[in-house]
Image (cartoon, rainbow, N blue to C red):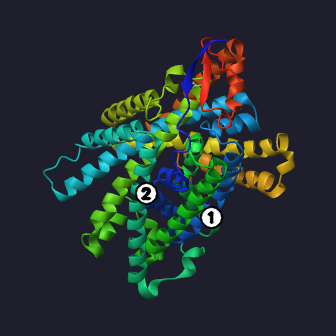
Amino acid sequence: MSGETVQGLRRDAVGLREVLFQSVTAMAPAAAVAASIPSGAAFAGGSLPLSVLIALVACLFTASCVAELARELPAAGSVATYAAQGLHPTVGFLVGWGYVFVEALVPPLLLLQLGFTTAGTLHQEWSSYPENLWWPWALAGAAIIAVAGWFGVRASARFGTVLGVFEILVFLVFAVWLIGKAGGDNTLSVFGTSHTAKEYSGLGGVFAGSVYTVLAFAGFEAAAPLAEETRDPRRTMHRAVLGAALGIGLFYVLTTYAMTVYFGPDRFSGFGASGAASWEEVARASFGLFWVLVFLAVVNSTIANANACATVSTRTAFALARIRVLPRVLATLHPRHRSPVAGIAVQTVVTVGAVLGLGLGYDPVTAFLLLATVIVTVVIAVYIVVNLACAGYFLRRRRDLLKPVRHLLVPLLGIVAFVPALLTAAGLPVFDFVTELTTPVSYADPVVGVWMAAGVVVLLVLLRRHPERIAETARVHLDEPDSTDLPQNGAVQP
C-alpha cells in the first residue's frame, strides 16, 4: 500500500539536564513562590511551610505514577498514551483532547502575567509609564517562545534550562539571605500548627493551605512529552519527573520557610494579600536593588513556563495528529529542525488571540484568573486519571512488574490528595475554605464542559468512522523506525 512518509521528532536531541528543566520551568518556581504559594497563607498563616511540605508529599505520589508510566511508555503522547494503555483508548483520547487544550492555554496565561507584572513595576518606578500598557510585553514574550520552538527541542530546552537556573539561583540566594537576617527568629515551629490563621486554626488551616499550595506543583509531568526526543528516555524520563517534583518541592519548602521566619509567623496570614507585603516589596524595603533581580526572576519564570508548556502542547498535538485523531496538519515538521512547525504556528495564534481577546476584553488580571481556573481544573483531573492508569497498566499489562505499594497504594494516595484540589479549583464549596467562583472566572467550568463535550462528539464520530485511529492512542512509536508511514486513506500503517 503506497503512502507518504512523515518524519518523526528528532531522536536523541536532549538529555537529562534539558528534560529535567523542562519539568522545572513548567512548574514556574519563581512565579509560584512569589504569587501562587502565598495564597495559602490566608489559611495556614505562619504554618505555611508545613502546608508546602504536605503538598510536596501529595504531589510525589502522582509524580511517582507518571515516572513509572514514562519509563514503561516513552511517548510524545505522554498522559494520553498512559491513559490509553492503562485504562482504555477512548479514555486516552479524551485525556489527550483535554490536555492539549489546557496546555495550549498556559502560554497566554503566563504572558498575561508577564504583561501586567512588567507594566505594573514600570509604572511604580516611573509614573509616566501607563499601567494599562501591558500587551506589548506579552506579545514580545509570544514572539520569543515562537522563535525558540521553531528552532527545535534542543534550542527551546536549552533556552528553558538557562532561564530555569537563573530564577532558582535568585530565589535561593534571597532565601538564604532572609534566613540569615531572621537570626534568632528562625524556628521549626512553622512546621507545626501553632501559627495558622485564626479563622482556620490547627490542622484544618494547614490542610486548606496545602490544597492551595498543591497547585504550584502543576507541571512536574512536562518532561514526559519529550520522550521521543530524549537520550535513553526510559531512564531519563523517570529521573526527570521525580527529580523535578522533589527538587522544586524542597525549593518551595526552603523559600517559604525563609520568608515566614523573616516576616514573622504570627502575622504571616496577611502576607501577599491585597495591600500587604510581597516578595518584591520585602526585597525593596530591606535589600535595596536586589528587588530588581527578584522582579527579573519572576518575569523570567513566566517566559520559561510559557516556553515549556508550548513544547508540551505542540508535542502532544503532534502525537495525536500523526494518528489522525487531530487534524493531520499538526503533524507537520520542519525539514531541518524537526520541530512541529504547524503546531507552533497554531500555538502562537492561540496565544496572541487569548492574550489580546481576553486581556483587552476584560483586563489582564481577570483574564489570568479565568485561564488559570480552566487550566488547573483540567490538569488536576488528568493527574487523577493518570493515577488510575498507573494501577490499571501494571494490573492489566505488566503484572510481572507489579509492586503493590508503588503501583496500587501510591496511585490511590495520589487520587485522594488531588480530589480536594480539584474541587477547590472548580470552585465547588465542599469545604468551608473554598470560595465560590465569581463572574467571569465562573465561566471556567462551562468552558471546560463545552470543550470536553465537543471531545465526546469527536470521539463518537471517530469510533463510528475510524475506530482504528482511537486504538492508535495506545501506540508507543519510540521502538519503531525513525519515521511514521501515513497512507493516503488516513490509517496508520503498523
The quadrant holding residue 354 is top left
Front residue of 332 and 65: 332
The quadrant holding residue 361 is top left
For this orientation, the residue located farthest to the right is 400
**Residue 258 tag number:** none
Image location of residue 90, percent across then percent down: 71, 27
Q: Is residue 177 above or below residue 477?
A: below
Front residue of 378 and 269: 378
Image location of residue 402, percent across then percent down: 83, 51
Q: Amino acid at mark 2?
A: Gly
| Quarter in which the C terminus is drawn | top right
Residue at the disc numbered 1: 54
Residue at the disc numbered 2: 164
Q: Earlier in the sequence, mark 2 or mark 1?
A: 1
The quadrant holding residue 324 is top right
Q: Is residue 293 left or right of residue 40?
A: left
Residue at horizontal 53%, vertical 74%? 195
Q: Is residue 208 visible?
A: no
